[in-house]
Amino acid sequence: MPLTSQDIEPALLLWPALAHGRTELVNHSENQTFRIDTLDNRCFMLRVHRMGYQSARSVQSELDWLQALQRDTDLPIPDPVPGDDGKLLQTFVAGDGTTRMAVLFRHIAGSEPEPHSNLSELFGTLGDYAARLHQHASAWQRPAGFERQSWQATTILDRDALWGDWRVGPGVNAHNRPVLDRLNAALQQQLIGYGHDTNRYGLIHADMRLGNLLIDGQAVSLIDFDDCGFCWFTYDFAAAISFHETNPAIPALKSAWLERYRAVRALDARDIASIDGMVMLRRMALLAWIGSHAETSLAQLHAPGFADGTAALAERFLAGPVWPV
């Protein structure tokens, strides 16, 4: 069961500014996010972590990268707020008796973009942001003990994958399982050939989907670095079209993303050719995620037909390019 506003009252004591603030649950996906409006008319977002997903060291490493990005770039990203003890990562005992990790962020104005609006300009911005993130990550000297998950074939496609086993995802059945198995094998082979050279594999956001963007006029903010980790750089495009891979605008969005990305950071022909495979890898990750997060509204929204849709995309992918530039 999700935590309630009453359950997180002990967390508010860790940040003096939150005393007697009004709380509202605004998102329940991997974690739970509460909006907190304070008595002095300030607004914050409290992220309460899902139990058993990230370790304390992993969350601290995410925050280390966020702080480095704030110091070294002007990217519009979340701004974490230290607690009364000066630490960004806090723990508290929730009303249900569980010990939870929590991070407080300053509120960012904006709303999620609509998936069927004109997204070409937005995807150009995402290409620019992704390139700048990857450029920073490639040059940044990570602190000792830095620890983030690796998103690769084994951690996405294996039975003990980070988001669960796609084979037991909702809607996977005797009809669509054979083509999904063929896709699984093809992706394994393609990724072995693509390799892990540092010019194509490194620290990325890994979840730059529409739900993690906030649009406020012309300003586009990128939020939720909770899934950041080590992966192929082109996976950040795949994550950007999560749940919308069948949108007929995808080739145009891919072109817009590539144009702005390559204005900042080089991609060679093999990198560009990898993108379709990354989209299918992400799709398989989402199929597993929907099954392992069935209690969330996002999983419930996309579960119907998702496995059959993935199988249809797999047939196209195995036959040749799906989203040509």
Image (tube, rainbow, N blue to C red):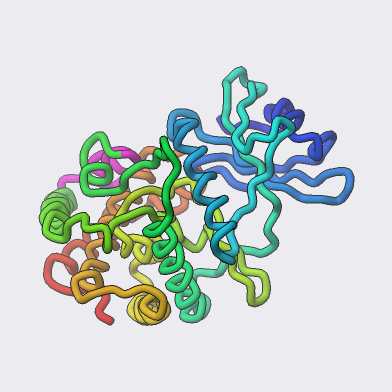
Q: Nearer the viewer, residue 31 or 177?
A: 31
Total tally of numbered discs in the picture: 0
Residue found at x 72% / y 47%: 44
Q: Position of residue 202 (x, y in %)?
A: 33, 55
Q: Nearer the viewer, residue 91 or 201?
A: 201
Residue found at x 59% / y 66%: 74
* Quarter of the view holding residue 207: bottom left
Location of the C terminus by quadrant is bottom left
Name above or below for residue 58 compared with residue 187. Answer: above
Q: Nearer the viewer, residue 320 or 65?
A: 65
Main structural element of the magenta stretch: helix, strand or loop?
loop
Q: Does residue 145 appear to the left or right of 102 in the view shown?
A: left
Q: Nearer the viewer, residue 2 or 18?
A: 18
Name above or below for residue 233 compared with residue 307. Answer: below
Boundaries of the magenta span: 162-174
- Which residue is most to the right? 40
**Residue 45 belongs to magenta span:** no
**Residue 171 belongs to magenta span:** yes
Q: Position of residue 83 (x, y in %)?
A: 70, 35
Residue found at x 45% / y 67%: 132
Residue found at x 51% / y 34%: 50
Asked if one can make out residue 184 in the rendered structure from this viewpoint, the answer is yes
Asked if one can make out residue 175 in the rendered structure from this viewpoint, the answer is no
Name above or below for residue 187 compared with residue 147. Answer: below
